[in-house]
Image (cartoon, rainbow, N blue to C red):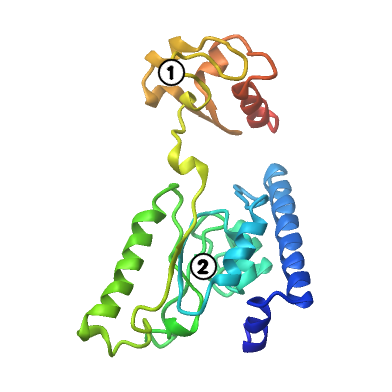
Amino acid sequence: MTEQSEQLRTQFTRESIIEDYRVAFRSRQASLIGRKEVLTGKAKFGIFGDGKEVAQLAMARAFRKGDWRSGYYRDQTFILATGMGTLDEFFAQLYADPDVAHDPWSGGRSMNAHFASRLLNPDGSWKNQTDAYNTSADVSPTGSQMPRLLGIAWASKLYREVDLFKSMTQFSRDGDEIAWGTSGTTTTASRSPTNFRSPRGICRSCSRDFSATRKRSRASTFTRSRAGTIPRYAKRTSTPPPSCAWSTFRRSSTSSR
């Protein structure tokens, strides 16, 4: 990103607002197209950031060179808005392209929307991180980005307070950078069926009693299928009414069989 485009991104002008709209629109279309590619079998797995475009555009406006992101797999709009990635690279990762020239974040080794900054030059020397937008390498478990976020913030504190690190100007400007973190609701919610049940085992959507399933261990609650992870008890009990959240989940999970 050039200095002129950087100035454009951080100011609310007619041009910058239109550019924000372009980024949001392209990101939303990438989500829709990517999901079609997965559902039609052209890509193995996909997870996308549609619905989060505006918040990530706001974050991108405040993000400065030298700052660090520790986020999760729905931050594609932010990555596009800061110029840390392109749509070509986004889809290359979706298709697991092993060429780092196409997927510089993981070389096809990570699932899609797992971003990372390459910190070394071809000769093995460190890149100047204070002159770039930086992101730690994403990992899949939601919430695992938070310990890393604290570590990045702690590093900034050390660069600011420890004299030994003052000379390492390629990593920090005296700890002036900001560590940014993003997360989703699943980080603070269990992925077991209790998401949709009251403490007594009654479904909040359809009032159906699933309390018997609470006796099963978590390991036996889920089973793998070609379409995805499906609650095992959803197969063994009668089908709940259409309003039930589990019924909706099951239909969407098995529709591609």
Q: What residue type is labelled 2?
A: Trp
Residue at (43, 86) in percent of width and height: 128
Instruction: Measuring from the top left, give residue 36's x and y in whole percent.
Output: 73, 47
Q: Name the residue under label 1.
A: 199
Vertical side of 44 occupied by 172: above or below: below
List x then y, in percent, for residue 78.
60, 64
Is residue 88 among what the camera can see?
A: yes
User: Given the current orientation, which residue lies at the most extreme front position?
Assistant: 12
Which numbered disc covers residue 177?
A: none
Split into 4 quadrants, where in the image is the C terminus?
Answer: top right
Please rate how many residues cluster around mark 1, counting C-alpha atoms within 10 Å: few if below 14, some from 14 to 19, many from 20: few
Q: In this view, does 242 lie above or below 212?
A: below
Looking at the picture, how far across and down is residue 218, in whole percent?
38, 25
Q: In which quarter of the image is the N terminus?
A: bottom right
Query: Which one is nearer the viewer's eye here, 106 or 145?
Result: 145
Tell me if residue 184 comes above or below residue 21 in the rendering.
above
In the rendered image, residue 98, in percent from the top left (x then y), is placed at 54, 65
Question: Which residue does the image show at 41% across and 22% down from the upper left?
Answer: 220
Query: How far apart are the two marked residues, 1 and 2, measured between alpha carbons?
Result: 42 Å
- The picture quadrant where one finds residue 241 is top right
From the viewer's perspective, tell me whether residue 74 is left or right of residue 211: right
- SS label for mark 1: loop
Residue drawn at the location 25% of the way across and 84% of the way down: 165
Q: Earlier in the sequence, mark 1 or mark 2?
A: 2
Question: In this rendering, does residue 85 appear at all?
Answer: no
Kindly report which numbered mark, 1 or 2, lies closer to the viewer in this rendering: 1
Query: Within 10 Å of the Cα at label 2, are there few (<14), some (14-19), or many (20+) other Cα atoms?
Result: many
Q: Residue 105 carries which label?
A: 2
Secondary structure at numbered mark 2: loop
- In the foreground, 63 or 108: 63
